[in-house]
């Protein structure tokens, strides 16, 4: 009986130890996943070419900026390919991403490859590349800035709702959907829009080595195909990633055959946010409607002629 009791005690001790080791292994695995998934990540190691995808609406992103800072300092990254498929975004979002590409370009070559769409702030970002490529059917251009509002005062009046605002000055919080837009407010907003527009046009002129007088006719908000953009000197050539790699080899001396590794900005709650987006039915339309501030975005409406 004593021997059996000892065996039973030993088994219980062994089970407890196994449970502790299993728990420790789970904790270590979770910590590793959080470490790998949290924040910016640059794949270091042997020499390679980095690839970064710019997709959807372009906004400010501190972790993305940190990613490019690390990429610029990583000697194992010999070049950067930026693939853009975006209708644009906020002016500041495009500006900060453009500046990040220019910072990387100070250390290694940057090639931009336009996908289906690279318009407005998406084109602003493309200007950060040392070489801009587009497919023949790429939609690009839409150089301009927009600030949109609505006047819902008529609807509110029909609903019996009266809005009041106590402001320090007439131009505070204008334009606003809850009050008619005055001529004074319209002119004040137009001054801001034109200042940002001039910044955009100046950027195009400097980066594309064109006089502003030549850029202005192209900056009336129109879009261009890749072929038209090449003719207008808004891009350098027609092509994709294959042509980008060829340019890096022949023009910048980047060794042929280097692996191309994709880099991403990952959030700690990426899986959770993805699940919530699926549950709530979040769409690109909703994402656009949440934009605030000055916007450089091409709106495509298939329902309009």
Image (spheres, rainbow, N blue to C red):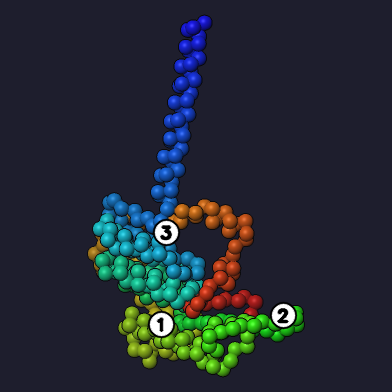
Mark 2 or 3, nearer chain start: 2
Residue at the extreme bottom? 183
Quadrant assignment, res 254: bottom left
Give the foreground label among 2 and 3: 2
Q: What residue is rendered at 34% in x and 86% in y?
A: 210
Foreground pick, 272 / 245: 272
Q: What residue is rendered at 46% in x and 53% in y?
A: 268
Q: Can residue 225 be seen?
A: no
Mark 2 or 1, nearer chain start: 2
Which numbered disc covers residue 200?
A: 1
Foreground pick, 117 / 25: 25
User: In the image, 132: left or right of 2?
Assistant: left
Q: Are marks 2 and 3 in contact (CB under 8 Å)?
A: no
Query: Could you say whether the residue bearing mark 1 is in a helix, strand or loop?
Result: helix
**Quadrant including the C terminus:** bottom right
Which numbered disc covers residue 161?
A: 2
Q: What residue is rendered at 44% in x and 90% in y?
A: 217
Question: How much space separates mark 2 and mark 1, taking CA atoms?
Answer: 41 Å
Percent across and percent down for residue 18 are: 45, 27
Question: How much space separates mark 2 and mark 3, taking CA atoms?
Answer: 45 Å
């Amino acid at each position: 009986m004593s021997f059996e009791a000892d065996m039973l005690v030993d088994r219980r001790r062994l089970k407890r130890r196994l449970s502790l080791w299993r728990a420790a292994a789970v904790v270590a695995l979770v910590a590793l996943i959080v470490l790998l998934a949290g924040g910016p990540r640059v794949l270091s190691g042997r020499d390679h070419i980095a690839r970064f995808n710019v997709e959807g609406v372009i906004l400010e992103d501190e972790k993305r900026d940190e990613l490019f800072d690390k990429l610029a300092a990583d000697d194992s990254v010999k070049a950067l390919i930026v693939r853009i498929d975006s209708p644009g975004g906020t002016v500041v979002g495009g500006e900060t991403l453009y500046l990040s590409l220019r910072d990387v370009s100070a250390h290694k070559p940057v090639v931009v490859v336009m996908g289906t769409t690279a318009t407005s702030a998406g084109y602003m970002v493309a200007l950060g590349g040392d070489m801009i490529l587009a497919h023949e059917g790429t939609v690009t251009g839409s150089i301009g800035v927009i600030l949109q509002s609505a006047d819902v005062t008529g609807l509110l009046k029909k609903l019996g709702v009266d809005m009041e605002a106590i402001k320090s000055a007439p131009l505070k919080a204008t334009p606003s959907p809850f009050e008619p837009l005055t001529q004074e407010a319209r002119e004040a907003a137009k001054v801001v829009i034109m200042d940002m527009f001039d910044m955009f046009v100046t950027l195009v002129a400097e980066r594309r080595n064109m006089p502003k007088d030549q850029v202005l006719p192209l900056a009336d908000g129109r879009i261009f195909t890749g072929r038209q953009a090449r003719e207008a000197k808004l891009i350098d050539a027609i092509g994709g990633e294959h042509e980008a790699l060829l340019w890096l080899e022949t023009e910048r001396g980047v060794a042929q055959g280097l692996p191309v590794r994709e880099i991403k900005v990952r959030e700690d709650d990426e899986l959770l946010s993805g699940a919530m987006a699926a549950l709530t039915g979040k769409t690109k339309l909703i994402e656009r409607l949440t934009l605030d501030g000055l916007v450089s975005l091409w709106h495509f409406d298939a329902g309009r002629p």
